[in-house]
């Protein structure tokens, strides 16, 4: 489905990022995988992709830093070619009572979750425009819609991503580039399970979350990857500026 395409997955660490990278490779894409610090994680993912017969490179970069983003794109273009698909999955979480949110924490969340997708999109778009084809997928989240307490910084950037996605979609549509967002919730990841363990009991926590979901189950990273694959496909070529919620009905918008 994606033979000949080159993808960049930012935030390609465990769970959703890694699953997206592997799914793109299974569909025929060559994939660059990025995280900020843990090179071992993306080395393993890149090795797994290469074993599928696809090309892959791991790239460490802080996506909130314009210079590092530029260097990352130069490396990818030099080793793989022009990026056709960008998955902006890098996410930094920050929970705190609003009156205790430090300005440094606020700025760090904006830098990673909102400035990062902007910089990465700016970096890849010239190549997409030249080729007349591209796919950009951003990540919003349920906090922005529900307005969860103690999550003001995250809720702010999640809704910011929605506006960013819509406006960029309008601007890039004439160039054959679609821009969409995915809004996950209730996805069973290592972080989700550790949160349950920290709260009181992992199994009880998981069951309580399932009970709050109409489908009475947690989602899997594969559910997110399948959604992203669809948005990358030609079948989704007439979908742009949309935010697709993948949350088992936990929030309906």
Image (cartoon, helix red, strand yellow):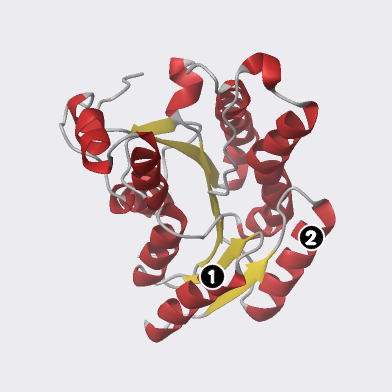
- Residues under numbered marks 2 and 1 in contact, where contact means CB atoms less than 8 Å apart: no
Q: Percent from the top left, x then y, of residue 7?
A: 53, 63
Apparent side of residue 73 relative to residue 209 in the rendered image (left or right): right
Apparent side of residue 119 relative to residue 86 in the rendered image (left or right): right
User: Is disc 2 placed on a helix, strand or loop?
Assistant: helix
Dot 2 corresponds to which residue?
68
Dot 1 corresponds to which residue?
42
The one of 168 and 197 positioned closer to us in this rendering: 197
Q: Is residue 195 above or below residue 69?
A: above
Q: Quadrant of the C terminus?
A: top left
Q: Quadrant of residue 195?
A: top left
Would you call the spot at circle 2 few (<14 residues within 10 Å), some (14-19), or many (20 or more)? some
- Distance from the alpha carbon under mark 2 to that under mark 1: 17 Å
Q: Percent from the top left, x then y, of residue 19?
A: 38, 60
Q: Percent from the top left, x then y, of residue 76?
A: 67, 71
User: Is disc 1 placed on a helix, strand or loop?
Assistant: helix
Q: Quadrant of the N terminus?
A: bottom left
Q: Residue furthest right?
A: 67
Apparent side of residue 32 relative to residue 238 in the rendered image (left or right): right
What label does residue 184 carry, if any? none
Q: Is residue 54 above or below residue 66?
A: below
The mark lying in front, picked from 2 and 1, is: 1
Q: Residue at x 72, y 55 (%)?
A: 62
């Amino acid at each position: 489905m994606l033979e000949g395409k080159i993808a960049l997955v930012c935030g390609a660490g465990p769970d959703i990022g890694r699953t997206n990278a592997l799914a793109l490779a299974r569909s025929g894409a060559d994939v660059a995988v990025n995280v900020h610090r843990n090179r071992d994680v993306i080395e393993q993912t890149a090795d797994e992709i290469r074993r599928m017969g696809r090309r892959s490179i791991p790239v460490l970069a802080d996506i909130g830093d314009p210079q590092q983003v530029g260097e990352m794109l130069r490396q990818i273009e030099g080793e793989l070619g022009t990026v056709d698909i960008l998955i902006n999955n890098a996410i930094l979480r920050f929970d705190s009572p609003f009156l205790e949110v430090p300005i440094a924490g606020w700025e760090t969340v904006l830098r990673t979750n909102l400035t990062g997708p902007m910089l990465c999109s700016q970096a890849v778009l010239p190549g997409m425009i030249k080729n007349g084809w591209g796919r950009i997928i951003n990540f919003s989240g349920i906090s922005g819609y529900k307005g969860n307490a103690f999550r003001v910084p995250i809720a702010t950037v999640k809704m910011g991503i929605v506006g960013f996605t819509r406006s960029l979609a309008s601007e890039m549509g004439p160039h054959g580039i679609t821009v969409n967002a995915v809004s996950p919730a209730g996805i069973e990841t290592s972080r989700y399970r550790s949160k349950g363990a920290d709260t009181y009991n992992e199994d009880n926590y998981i069951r309580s979350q399932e009970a709050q979901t109409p489908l009475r189950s947690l989602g899997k990273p594969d559910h997110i990857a399948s959604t992203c694959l669809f948005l990358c496909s030609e079948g989704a070529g007439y979908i742009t500026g949309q935010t697709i919620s993948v949350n088992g009905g936990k929030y309906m918008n």
